[in-house]
Image (spheres, rainbow, N blue to C red):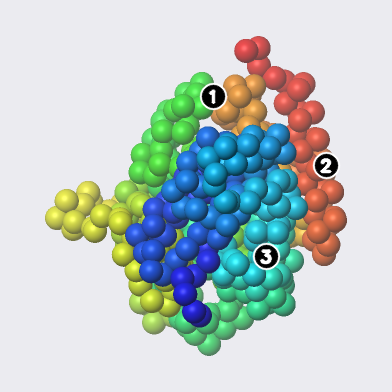
Amino acid sequence: MNGPIGVTVLGSTGSIGVSTLDVVQRHPDRFRVAALTAHRNVEGLLQQCLTHRPAFAVMADLAAAARLEDRLRALGEPTEVLAGAAGLRHVAAMAETDYVMAAIVGAAGLLPTLAAARAGKRVLLANKEALVMAGALFVAAVREGGAELLPIDSEHNAIFQCLPVGFDGADAGRSGVRRIVLTGSGGPFRTAALERLPEMTPDQACAHPNWNMGRKISVDSATMMNKGLEVIEAHWLFGVASEQIEVVVHPQSVVHSMVEYEDGSVLAQLGNPDMRTPIAHALAWPRRLASGAAFLDFFQLRPLEFQPPDFNRFPCLRLAFAALAAGGTAPAILNAANEVAVRAFLERKIRFTDIASVVEHVQGQVARRAADTLEWILEDDASARAEADGWIAARALEV
Ligand code: NAD
Ligand code: MG
C-alpha cells in the first residue's frame, strides 16, 4: 500500500472512537483519517475534524449534519459533510477508506459495518451488537467481500492473539483447541447484596471498577449481559460452539481472556485495562505498534482471582446463552430487548433488575425464525423493541 492507511472511525466521538484517534495520532506516518462519524454531537465532531482533517464527516442526525456543515464552512475547513444512514454506509465503503473502526454503539452500527465488510475493508469490530444481531450474514459478508475482521473487544482480541493463525472453529479438533475462556470482571455489583440490586442507580451501574466506557456497555457490564453478548460474539468470530466457551469471573481485568489446548496448555493475553492495546493490535496486525497504554507492573498487581459466574445474580448471562442455543433471530431479539431496557433504565423508567425481566419477557413473546435475511432480522428487532416498550410502558416507575 502506498502512503498512509486511510482509517474511517464510525462512532468517533465515543469512548472507543476517542481511543482509536489517540492511537492513530501517534503514528502519522502510518495512518491518515479518512472519515469521522457521530450521532448528533456537533461540537465533539467539529473539534475532531479540526484536529484530524478528515476528507469526510458524517452525522447520523440530519439537523446536526446541517449545523456541522455551517460550522466547518465558517471556519473555511474543507471536510465534506454527509448525513444519515446513507452517509455512514458511504464512508464505510468508499475507496479512500482502507480500515474501518466499527465503534457505533448498538444496532445502529449494523448496516455501515456490513457495508465495510462487503467492500472488503479491514474491519476493526468494537460494535459487538452488529455481530450478535446478524452473525451468519456478517461472517458471510466478510468472506464474500474479501474483508479482514479483527476483534477490538478486549476479550476477543485476546483470544485472537492466543489462537493459532488462521484459526476457524471447524479446525478446533485439528488445532487442539479445547476451550475458549472468556474472562469478565463481574462489574460494579459483583459483591453487592442481592436484595439491594433493585435500588441501584444508573450512576452506580456505570461506575465500572476497571474500565471507563460508554454508558450502554457499562450497564451491560453491570448485568453481565455484556459477557452474554460476548459469548455470542465469540461464537461467530471464532466459529466455536457455545459448549466450548467458558465464562470466568476475573475481577482484576488483567487476564483479558484465554485459550485452553488439549495438551493442558493455556495461553492468556495480559495487559492493563486500556482499549488502546487491542485497538493498536488490530491497526498494526500482524505487526505491533506503540499504543500509549501503560505497561504492566507485575510487582504492583493485585492477586489474580478467578470465580465461576453466578447465574442467579446475573440472569442476563443465562438469557444470552439461551438465545445462542435457540439460534436464528433469537440473539437479535435478545439484543433489541436489552437495548430498549438499558435505555429505559438509564432514563430511570425501570429498575436495574427489570432489565433482565424485560429481556426474558420479550424472549417469550417474539417468536424467533431463521436469520437468513437482513429483512427478517430487522423485523424481529423491531418487534422485540415494540414488545419491550409495551412492558416498560405498563410498569414504568413514577419519576
Ligand atoms: P459510546 O456511547 O461512548 O460511543 C458511541 C458512538 O456511537 C458515539 O460516537 C455516538 O455518536 C455514536 N452513535 C450512537 N448512536 C448512534 C446512532 N444511532 N447512529 C450513529 N452513530 C451513533 O460507546 P463506546 O463505549 O465507545 O462503545 C462503542 C461500541 O464498542 C459498543 O458496541 C460497545 O459494546 C463496544 N465496546 C466498547 C468498549 C469500551 O471500552 N468502551 C469495549 C469493548 C467493546
Ligand atoms: Mg469486552
- Sequence-earlier tag: 1 or 2: 1
Tell me how far mark 1 sits from mark 2, CA to CA.
27 Å
Secondary structure beneath dot 3 equals helix
Q: Which of the two residues, 95 or 344, is positioned nearer the viewer here?
A: 95
Secondary structure beneath dot 2 equals helix
Task: From the viewer's perspective, tell me whether residue 200 is left or right of residue 369.
Answer: left
Label 3 is placed on what type of residue? Ala
Tell me how far mark 3 sits from mark 1, CA to CA.
44 Å
Quadrant where the C terminus sits is top right
Residue occupying image coordinates x 39% and y 57% = 25
Marks 2, 3: nearer the viewer: 3
Tell me how far mark 2 sits from mark 3, CA to CA.
29 Å
Secondary structure beneath dot 1 equals helix
- Sequence-earlier tag: 2 or 3: 3
- Quickly name the residue at label 2: 383
Label 2 is placed on what type of residue? Ser
Residue 88 lies, with reference to residue 189, above or below; the image says below
- Quickly name the residue at label 3: 93
Q: Circles 1 and 2: CB distance less than 8 Å?
A: no
Q: Residue 70 is drawn in which quadrant? A: top right
Residue occupying image coordinates x 46% and y 33% = 206
- Quickly name the residue at label 1: 198
Residue 355 place in picture, x, y as percent: 62, 33
The residue positioned farthest toward the bottom in the image shown: 174
Count of marks placed on residues: 3
Marks 3, 1: nearer the viewer: 3
